[in-house]
Image: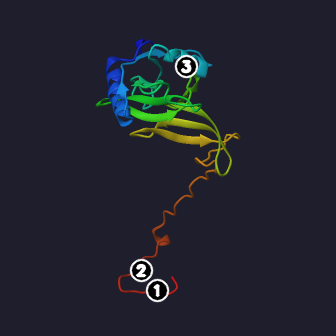
Amino acid sequence: MGARYALPPAALTAWETFARGQCRDQGERFAAMRFAPLTGAGEGPDLVEQHFAGNTGGFVPADFNADGNPDFVVTTPGYGCVSSGPAYGDQGPPVDFIVSTASGYRVFDGFMGWIAPAMINRRGDRDVLDLPGGFNGRCGPVTTVTWGWTGNNIDAVERRNDSGQRVDREGCAQTPAAPRASSVAAVQPIEKGFYAFAA
């Protein structure tokens, strides 16, 4: 599959338009960037940094919206913005998503972090990115944040703690929503003009 070795021109053009806007918002100048595929299961900061030499970003192919066309996760030193140094700290570089849609490729802002091909996993008919979290919220740890397609966007669609339990962004356990009563008799409307005290 050619997408494994190069970003399609339409995907690259969509990303460059997005990146130019990011650089403009930061008051910096954009410089064209080449992309090379990230390879291997153990991609870490040192290996990703190697891709950044010579103004090169990295990418991983996926299919987030199950349309059968390649989507991409891309990582760069700083969106291709020209600056005196990397635009990130220990948290990692910018990671964004390029998704194929009926109207062409769209780019979605992601997160700051380190990525690896092994983080892309299949769930049903589509791919997701399982990002190790490793931070503590108000209720406890969030060890995995799953990024995926919401129907019109890429966003965090699930979080889990170190026990595998679903949690919110604060590490608080999420309980399944209680089923709604379907009986019409369960709702007693108050007729117009009727006043109820202590209701």
Looking at the rendered image, the quarter that the N terminus falls into is top left
**CB under 8 Å between discs 1 and 2:** yes
The answer to whether residue 176 shows anywhere in this view is yes
Amino acid under disc 3: Val
Mark 1 vs mark 3: give the one in front.
3
Mark 3 vs mark 2: give the one in front.
3
Q: Which residue is drawn at 41% across and 22% down?
A: 70
Taking 162 as reference, is 36 left or right?
Answer: left
**CB under 8 Å between discs 3 and 2:** no
The answer to whether residue 127 shows anywhere in this view is no
Local SS, label 1: loop
* Total count of labels: 3
Q: Residue 196 carries which label?
A: 1
Q: From mark 3 to mark 2, how far is it between C-alphas?
A: 64 Å
Q: How is the image coloured?
A: rainbow
Residue 89 image point, x, y percent = 56, 31
Q: How crowded is mark 1: few (under 14 residues within 10 Å), some or many (20 or more)?
A: few
Q: Looking at the image, is mark 1 or mark 3 earlier in the sequence?
A: 3
Q: How crowded is mark 3: few (under 14 residues within 10 Å), some or many (20 or more)?
A: many
Image: 102 above or below 9: below
Direction right: furthest residue = 163
Task: Report which residue position mark 3 lands on.
Answer: 48
Q: From mark 1 to mark 3, how far is it between C-alphas?
A: 67 Å
Task: Report which residue position mark 2 lands on.
Answer: 190
Image: 3 above or below 191: above
Amino acid under disc 1: Ala
